[in-house]
Every structure is written in C-alpha cells, then in structure tokens.
Image (cartoon, rainbow, N blue to C red):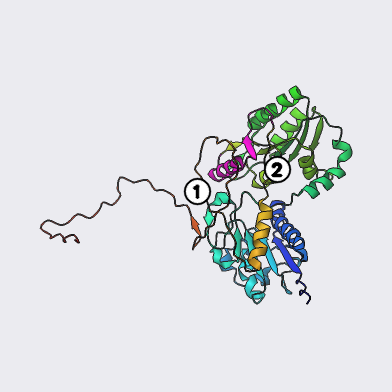
C-alpha cells in the first residue's frame, strides 16, 4: 500500500519590505522549506510586501477594522490562502490576526517578534528571548531569524572571490549599525572605534572588511572610512553588489556594533568569534541579548585585540523552523524554559544549557519591581475598642 503523498506547503513571508524586518520573515520561511524538504515534503515561498494607503498604517491594529480594503494593490493579500503565514513587523498585525479566519482555519499563522497584542490571536509567536515573553504558543529564541546558511555564505563568497582570496589574514569583518532609540554613533565614538580596529590590524598584518548600515550617521561613516581606508581589504560604500554575506564567509573574526540584533545573530551563526563594539547609549534588552550570546560561547565584548575560540554555531532559525512544522502537524513539542536573565558584569561564555520541558498557561512578562514610596498605604489598623477575630485553631 502506497503512502499518501504529502501536500505541498505554501508559505507566505510577509513584511512591510524593510530589509531587516523582511529578512526575518524570509529567513524563517526558507528554514521551514528546507526542513520540510528534508522530511520528504515540498514547499514553495511567496514574498509579500504590504503597504497601506494614506495614514491607515499608523492606526493601532484594533482601529483597522477592514484592513484589506486599505492595502495598496501591490500588497496582494488575497486567496488562495497559504498553509503557513509568517509575518514580521507592526504593519502586518491587522492582517495576521485575521488570516486564520479569512482562510477558514486552513492557514497556520506565525508572528515574529513581540507583537504587543494578545499572543492568542496567532498560532505561534516567535519573539527574542530578551523580550522575556512566555506562554503556550510562544517560542522565545536567541536573537532573530535570518537567512545565513553555510551554502549561502559559500555561494556569496564566490561572487567576490577575486577581491577576497588574496587578502592577508587575519581578516576582520566590521559590521556597523548606527542611530536607534537606545544607541548612537557620534564622531567622537567613531574615532575611538577606528583606533581600536586599526591598531591590532596593523600589528597583526591583517585585512579589513567593513560595511555600514543605512542607520550609520554620515559623519561617523566618513570618519571611519578616512581613518581605515589605508588598510588592506574592502570598505563597502553602498554602491554595487552587497558583499555582506561574502564578508561573513571570508572573516576570521567578526566585530558587530551593539545596536543590531540581526547582525549579531547572523554573525553568531557562522561559528566564528564575534566581538561586540560599544556605542554611545545603553539598553537592558540588548545587554540581556549579548549576555545570552556570551553564555552560548558565541560573543564577547571587544577589548581592542583579536583572539580566537570555538563554539557550536547558533542555529535558532533552524530550531524555530522545526517547531513550526511540528506544531502544524499537531505534535507535542518540547520547549525551553524561559529563563529570567540576571544582569551580570561580563560572564564567561559557557555551553548552552539543555532544553527543558515547560509550558506557561498565559503569556507573561517579568514584573517590574516597584520601590516603596513615602506616601505608600499602610496596613489597616484596628479601631480602638474593636474586637479582634480569634485565630483559627
């Protein structure tokens, strides 16, 4: 008797098209497709970029009552509906919370990042661990899903092989972010950063592979380029093909500014030593994230010198993909316990702890401790002459 053929998995990867957000949705979709094929199934991916007419996209999700009416024609959010809906970003929320109803229950809906809406509105939510969100339908992961694989790194390296092959070692990839809510890169800090990068490279006789993000302030970009362009290597100026993945493939060491979850997670997936570059500003969430990478042996703060170590490449995207497929089949899944991270000074990297079985009945966050105030209410005192109730024997 023949085994019935498995139905193909149609996957939609949905975002507003911003590079960092879209990469998370596509990265998880590609990982699910690889896993489905490895298990003998089929999978196809459709990338959807949603945009809204007028100012509708700025409305809270609960005020956007008829979301498909306000989408631009290019968004193409119409049936036939996929088996798997993977969405990332605030712009997708009004659609994601209705996708299952639109599909008549056919579509399994996954929302990446903390949606900041009741997670029960989705089949699965995949936030970063540093958001400290837990629940039955929540899978916290280290960092964010991404598109880095050994195959992709090798193929991207081939594109830039002629420019990279003869560069002296050690080759140091420097991945620079920029201004965000928590961090900034003023010229003073950029000058210190240039000095920290330049000195050990000149001493070791290595080469530099540097790339900027769209958030890198222009004064910082100009200063770093001027100070470091005499070194062997490449500094990508944004023109022509992007060598980002080729840099990851070629590097012996990777330096990442502390403002980017995506770049640090992608760097940690290579198995190469990752150093975190300090910026101006601070963030508890990012500190928790970096300490999680340190515990897994992937990253350390940059101290002005390059040194090597080994660790198991961080593959949270693959773990999330296996979880998605298991849940689509209705299988019982073993989840990691959401560990509340204590903020330490600089913990030594250790091996990642083994997963444990746990399930929380509701989505919960770590409560904030409130300090007692001088005007805080005191316990009620019995009135004079009032009778006290006798204690239960």
Q: Residue furthest right?
A: 162
Residue 310 image offset from top left, x and y in percent: 68, 37
Magenta stretch encompasses residue 294: yes
Q: Which residue is mark 2?
A: 267
134 vs 257, nearest the viewer: 134
Is 5 left or right of 333, judged from the image as shown? right
Residue at the spot 58% in from the left edge and 52% down from the top edge: 355
Q: Quadrant of the C terminus?
A: bottom left
Residue 222 makes an appearance in the image? yes
Mark 2: give few (<14), some (14-19) or many (20+) Cα within 10 Å.
Answer: many
Span of residues in magenta? 282-307
368 vs 282, nearest the viewer: 368
Q: Residue furthest top?
A: 203
Magenta stretch encompasses residue 290: yes
Q: CA distance from mark 1 to mark 2?
A: 24 Å
Residue at the spot 72% in from the left edge and 65% down from the top edge: 12
* Helix, strand or loop for disc 2: helix
Q: Which residue is mark 1?
A: 340
Callout 1 touching callout 2 (CB < 8 Å)? no
Against 199, residue 244 (above or below) is below
* Helix, strand or loop for disc 1: loop
Residue at the spot 33% in from the left edge and 46% down from the top edge: 373
Residue 19 image offset from top left, x and y in percent: 72, 52
């Amino acid at each position: 008797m023949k085994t019935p053929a498995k139905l193909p998995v149609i996957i939609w990867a949905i975002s507003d098209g911003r590079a960092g957000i879209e990469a998370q949705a596509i990265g998880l979709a590609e990982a699910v497709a690889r896993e489905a094929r490895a298990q003998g199934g089929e999978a196809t991916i459709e990338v959807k970029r949603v945009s809204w007419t007028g100012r509708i996209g700025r409305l809270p999700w609960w005020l956007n009552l008829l979301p498909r009416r306000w989408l631009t024609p290019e968004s193409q959010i119409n049936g036939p509906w996929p088996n798997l809906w993977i969405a990332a970003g605030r712009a997708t929320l009004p659609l994601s919370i209705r996708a299952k109803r639109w599909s008549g229950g056919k579509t399994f809906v996954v929302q990446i990042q903390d949606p900041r809406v009741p997670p029960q509105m989705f089949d699965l939510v995949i936030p970063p661990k540093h958001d400290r969100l837990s629940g039955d339908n929540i899978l916290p992961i280290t960092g964010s899903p991404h598109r880095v694989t050994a195959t992709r790194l090798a193929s991207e390296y081939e594109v830039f092989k002629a420019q990279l092959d003869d560069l002296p070692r050690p080759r140091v990839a420097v991945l620079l972010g920029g201004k965000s809510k928590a961090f900034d890169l003023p010229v003073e800090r950029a000058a210190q950063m240039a000095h920290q990068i330049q000195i050990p490279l000149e001493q070791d006789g290595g080469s530099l592979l540097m790339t900027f993000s769209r958030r890198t302030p222009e004064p910082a970009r100009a200063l770093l380029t001027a100070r470091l362009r005499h070194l062997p290597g490449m500094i990508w100026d944004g023109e022509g093909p992007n060598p980002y993945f080729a840099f990851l493939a070629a590097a012996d060491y990777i330096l990442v500014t502390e403002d980017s979850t995506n770049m640090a997670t992608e760097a940690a997936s290579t198995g190469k030593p990752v150093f975190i570059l300090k910026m101006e500003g601070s963030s508890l969430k990012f500190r928790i994230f970096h300490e999680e990478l340190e515990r897994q042996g992937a990253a350390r703060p940059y101290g002005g010198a390059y040194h090597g170590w080994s660790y198991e490449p961080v593959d949270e995207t693959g773990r999330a993909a296996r979880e998605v497929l298991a849940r689509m089949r209705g299988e019982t899944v073993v989840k990691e316990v959401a560990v509340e991270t204590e903020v330490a000074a600089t913990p030594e990297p250790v091996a990642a702890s083994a997963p444990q079985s746990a399930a929380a009945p509701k989505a919960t966050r770590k409560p904030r401790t409130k300090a007692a105030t001088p005007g805080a209410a005191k316990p009620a005192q019995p009135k004079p002459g009032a009778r006290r109730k006798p204690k239960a024997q």
